[in-house]
Amino acid sequence: MGRKSFRAALNEALHQEMKADPRVVVFGEDVTGGTGGDGEQDAWGGAFGVTKGLLGAYGRERVLDTPITESAFVGAAAGAALTGLRPVVEIMFVDFIGVCLDQVMNQAAKFRYMFGGKTRCPMVLRATFGAGARSASQHSQALYPIFTHIPGLKVVIPSTPSDAKGLLIEAIRDDDPVVFLEHKMLYDEQGEVADQSYAVPFGEARIVREGPDAAIFAYGRMVGRAEAAAAKLAEEGINVSVIDPRTTSPLDTETILEFTEETGRVIIVDEASPRCGMAADISSIVAEQAFGALRAPILKVTPPHTPVPYAPSLEDAYLPDAARIVDAVRRSLAHR
Amino acid sequence: MQMSREDLERAYRTMRTIRAFETNVHVEAQAGRVPGSTHLYAGQEAVATGVCMALGNGDHIVSTHRGHGHSIAKGCEVGPMMAEILGKESGTCKGKGGSMHIADLNVGMLGANGIVGGGPPLACGAALTAKTLKTGSVAVAFSGDGAVNQGTTAESLNLAMVWNLPVIFVIEDNGWGEATSSEFATAGDIVMRAQGYGMAAELVDGLSLSNVYESTSAAVTRARAGEGPSLLHMKTERFYGHFNGDVDTYRSEESKRVQRHERDCLTRLRATLIKSGLIEEGTLDAIDAEVEDAIDAAVKAARAANEPDPATLETDVYVSYAEGN
Amino acid sequence: MNDTDRIVPITMPKWGMTMTEGKIAAWHVSEGGKAEAGEDLLDVETDKIANAVEAEKGGILRRILVHEGQSAPCGSLIAVMAEAAVSDEEIDEFLGGFAWFEQDDEAGPSVMEEIVEIGDLRVNVVTANGGAEGTPLVLLHGFGADASAWMFNQQALAAGRPVHAIELPSHGNSPMAPGLAGFAEIADALAPVIKHLMPDGAHLAGHSLGGRIALRLAAGAVDARSLTLIAPAGLGADANEDFIKGFLNAERRRPMKTTLQMLVADPAAITSDMIERTLAYKRLDGADAALRAIAEANLMGAAAAEGVAEELSALTRPLLVVWGREDAILPASGAEAAPKGATVELIDAAGHMPQMEKSGKVNDLIAAHLERAE
């Protein structure tokens, strides 16, 4: 046990799984960096440094840089997974899914069903996501609703270093294709992470905080903001629960309903666009299955339905923050 | 890389099986017994057969929307295939995939594919497995002339060279991408495209079983030796329209008649075998009869088979999925 | 008389290694109200735990500095108690010298942990007040638990003596030790660790399976100055198999919650954090196999009872047996097996975890027991 960064926790997960299972391979753009040059090898270790050091430990046979061709290498991951490897493939920004979605949506996600349950496609697609880095519209999106919409995929959004490690190990050991989304603003977050290998199961929410007055559901970086809002409210004697479902598919609907029943007030914080996002999805589940428990309308705290802007003032206004979450809780509590 | 008499007999049987299978699927489709679309392989049998005869059971193929021929040539059973196309429980994929998604990993058939250009990246992946786990296998990506213009094909050619993968790209050029001719849709030269990546590539007469077999065998040898990928541009022709609902008016009746009489790879193989004395006509006739019986039985069984149980609607999406635990 | 006698500062407690601050959940005594020694003054909670803070001495709660719902760092002053004779001015003066938000590093004896390696065995030892001179106390937790089972006891018992909470092999931060499963093997493996840390002998206390191990050690390999057994395995009826199987099989929050609630008299004592921590431990590679082996070797059927009578009769030093009357895992009737001369204390409104549920009471019992033994 020790304090580790989100990035280090992911790196440790990759090291431990590559060591434990020779079928695990890692590839993507610049997962090592420097390949073919006369300078430093493993120069980048991934655009965000998550895969640094794997090259030295496992060699070029299992840690491969790719050309900038997401369709080819994401599809190669799917083909490799069908035939006996357990690839962990990285696309630098989830926004780039636009050039290779077919290989995920029509190929990897559907093999098992189309082929009558006779195949497995144990691949992990890692990608960074999320706003906050002043990266503008093509490098900042929170596209997990797109993947969640596709049957056959599992979708994971860790919010702490400890979960990052345990969920990535689970993803690598899982026999289905898993989309593993890492918020780029969380890489330097520190937290307690066990040194040993461990796997955190999918479809089980983390109870971040328990309080009877309202339930806030949040993913990824929004979990921290929900916690900040909860802490602020606690100073006034308003005690709210904060729940991180951890995965959007499978979704821990039981815990969502449990906390809806316990609090009667539901606030969903989602960094994805408001239309057809997780906030909308969870709202519909709560409205359909726990309508009687609600004491106030379900409230969604999301960005506006716009692309992610560049200028700091605009981007800050775009993202849900603790003040907006506090405000939503107050509006919910105002309903008697 | 001469084919033995035994090989040739097997090749003839495979080609005849594909032809009979497709002829029957056509009948079933015309009669309204095929629930969805199906793309018939008749006319192109020499390609699937010649390529797959150069492969072993441990080698992998990735197919296309026109995949029945590849499936049969790689060893999928015709009974379950026919049942699958008719949407039956006893189908290769339990009725969940249909014509465009027949797959059987036990014989190295990684699936037909409903997406033009969907397959080449997958073949790179299968080749990566072979290379990483040192299995000695090779992977073949069948693609049509339409798919060569997809970005995935270009990306895969490049990746295959960059990673030096044991993969063979078989471009099965039947002259038509749906209803548009490749003359119009494909600029330049497909072999030269591959050569532009530094890849071994050649133009092959796809109507000649022996040409297909020999060029593929050479490519397989290179791949197994770690000498990297190849592209084989195989010129061929399809007998039917793009799919079962395509009345194929973009080709004249006369040209189709001439094609069937003068450029049928199966007739050509049969004539060569008889003329060269390698296999006597009676043996071939006997094969024809056996094949007819087998396909007949497959059709009858498929028609009689049960439709999938609605309870199976939600199975086989995931290996495991925890929800609302 | 100086301030420390007449004015008693109440500070935010520090429970366990990771607690840095606590929130006042409730004051049970209002400003100006009287409290007896041992009476619950307030409830403190963190995002992980919740427990009561008792008055060490009787007196009047003169000033509340941190109110309900507010948080304060561990060791910081949250209230002041004094007799009526102490003037408000004196209290103001006292407060002037004690900034309420000040982090006090002396918030209780210091706690550290280290892996101790003896031969092939590596175990994690959490030590409170390691530098103290008194006879050390060794704490051995139960099946599936870790040193945090003693979070309300370890520092409270560390006045003048080191208190070592040893994490059993394959538990807590001790590495997985497949093959080390039976209580006798574990005891034999731990004996050199205890001798290494405490060459001049130690008091031993064990809870549940840890109690069985402590008995084995005290009856043989270790120079035990006294022995405290809290709801020990092996003395009475077999362990509740529903609990053992529930614990082994629970992979998710809800079943684990139901299972852990069997441990305590008041189910509300089981917090989300305890559940999450227990699951996190069970999810470590190797934990499941280790736990199953330990359960199989000790807790399914009567395995833990083997040798108990002989070992109890071999004890030469004072024995304290503590049991929660509502123990649903190992029934309190097991206390009847305690030999003549042992001190037996049954705790009301406590289940299998009296040292957590009634920590003040149990701490007092253990402290008095240790004093008698010395």
Image: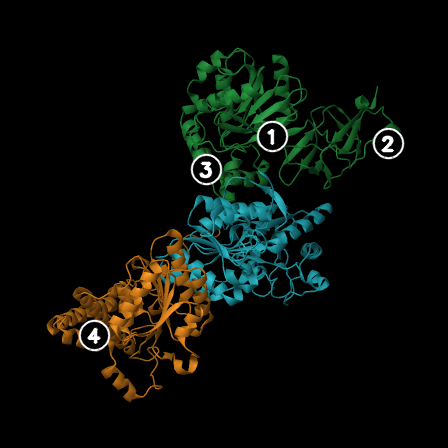
| Residue C108 position (above or below residue C248) | above
Q: Residue C105 falls in which quadrant of the image?
A: top right
- What's under tag 1, amino acid-wise? Glu
Residue annotated with mark 1: C113
Instruction: For the residues labelled 2 and 1, say whether their Cβ atoms are less than 8 Å apart.
Output: no
Which label belongs to residue C92?
A: 2
Q: Position of residue A258 (x, y in %)?
A: 55, 49
The C terminus of chain C is located in which quarter? top right
Q: How many marks?
A: 4
Is residue A121 found left or right of B94 in the rendered image? right
Mark seen at residue C286? 3
Of the residues shown, which amino acid type is indicated by label 3?
Gly
Instruction: Say left or right for C95 vs A239.
Output: right
- The chain under label 4 reads B
Neighbor class of circle 3 (other Cα within 10 Å; few <14, some 14-19, many 20+) is some
Question: Which quadrant of the figure has residue B177?
Answer: bottom left
